[in-house]
Image: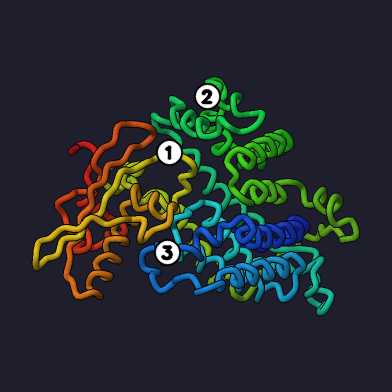
Amino acid sequence: MLNNWLFKHIDNSALIVFRIIFGLLCFLESVGAIFTGWVKRTLVDPDFTFNFIGFEFLQPLPGNGMYYYYVIMGVFGLLIMVGYKYRFSMIAFTIMWSATYLMQKSSYNNHYYLLMLLSGIMVFLPAHKYASVDVKLNPEIKSYSMPQWCRWIIILQLFIVYTYASVAKFYPDWLDTSVIELMMKGKKDYIFVGDFLQQKWLHFALAYGGILFDGLIVPLLLFKPTRKYAFIGSIFFHLFNSFIFQIGIFPYLALAFSLFFFSAEKIQKLFLKKKLYYTSEEISIPKLKAPLIIGFSIYFIIQIGLPLRHYFIEDNVLRTEEGHRLSWRMMLRIKSGQTSFWVENKDSGKRTHIDLNKYLSTKQKRSASTKPDVMWQFAQRLKQDFKNNGQDVAVYINCKVSVNGKPYKTLINPDIDIANVEWNVFNHSNWILPLKEE
């Protein structure tokens, strides 16, 4: 029964249109990163980047290399859009985007992570079987249908993203709207809407509306009687986020996902009028069904498990950041830090204060002041730099952080040589002080 359901063929109009939009958004994200100065600020100007731990071998290309890199990614986005050598272009974009995602985390954004996951998923989807250059060059691959699993794998990924985003908002500072209020204070100078964004009723609407939207949007889109209203609500929700928070392509990518919830016949009539509408519902079980099912089962087990890991780590993830990334904890808190680094010569005992301006960009300094994993990585770099100059040093950190405007509290044990401790991936690092001990 499961095989019959997964591999029953349905009309592929939604996937074809989504490929075109997805490729265009990949192009815009790539070239937009150049023209907005993001590539310069994040990958060109800094002397080094803070990678995801374990990916230290990934560093930006020297000189203007990263500009060329992003141009090439943009070209692959266009090739995906028009469906030319689709599989190769999709694999190439996935690898290149994943590399840039993993090589820096000072500019962390959940939609970067989502784009990496979706790119990997799109590699396996037959999104080039219609309205593509590949079909023009090889008409034999033309198809009006796709296996049903192609639709549901996108929906399941979305359900995981939105559900965890909703659950993460159930904590006091969000529920009493103090987080939203702090976020909106930073927008008070916005033309026309700055004063409007300071209204308390709006803060409540945004706080509880965010919980309800994230928690219910997928079920409401799946349920035909509420689908149209849910889509209209999505338009307002995502355009508001795009204007107020300026979060790149994510709002438009999220709207494009709606294609998989509406009737394929409607999608075909609206966007692909010359395409035949597929109604045969043929069941075609591929030879590689077992690896396909096992592979995606493992993938979704990981996707469901990763966002849960912070529940098994001591103290509050809002404070320690342990388990924060890859968990769909989107725009949940305002965090600031007062941090200083000291190196101590182990032979002479002399302590030297580190001027962060000599090492880090403005964005990197923010990360190194609030995020323990970045602090740990910077400590390792300082130790190595001094070792290269013939000095064996210990690295100590004085750090106080404030979460959501609350009083500053010590985050890092100032008596521990951070450069001489191991980083725990799935466990609590004891040099990060629990709030209850402060």
Q: Secondary structure at mark 3?
A: loop
Residue drawn at 78 percent across, 52 percent down? 264
Residue drawn at 28 percent across, 58 percent down? 376
Q: Earlier in the sequence, mark 1 or mark 2?
A: 2
Please say if the residues under marks 2 and 3 sit with CB atoms less than 8 Å apart: no
How far separated are the C-alphas under marks 1 and 3?
24 Å
Q: Position of residue 199 (x, y in %)?
A: 56, 21
The circle drawn on residue 204 is 2
Q: Earlier in the sequence, mark 1 or mark 3?
A: 3
Mark 1 neighbour density, 10 Å: few (under 14) some (14–19) many (20 or more):
many
| Quadrant assignment for the N terminus | bottom right
The quadrant where residue 395 appears = bottom left
The type of residue carrying mark 2 is: Phe
**Residue at numbered disc 1:** 333
Q: Secondary structure at mark 2?
A: helix
Up the image or down, 168 lies above or below 289; here it is above
Seen in the image, is 190 located left or right of residue 323? right
Label 1 or label 3, whichever lies nearer to me, is: 3
**Residue at numbered disc 3:** 49
Up the image or down, 163 lies above or below 272; here it is above
Asked whether the viewer can see residue 225, the reply is: no
Seen in the image, is 361 located left or right of residue 344? right
Q: Earlier in the sequence, mark 2 or mark 3?
A: 3
Seen in the image, is 312 located left or right of residue 225? left
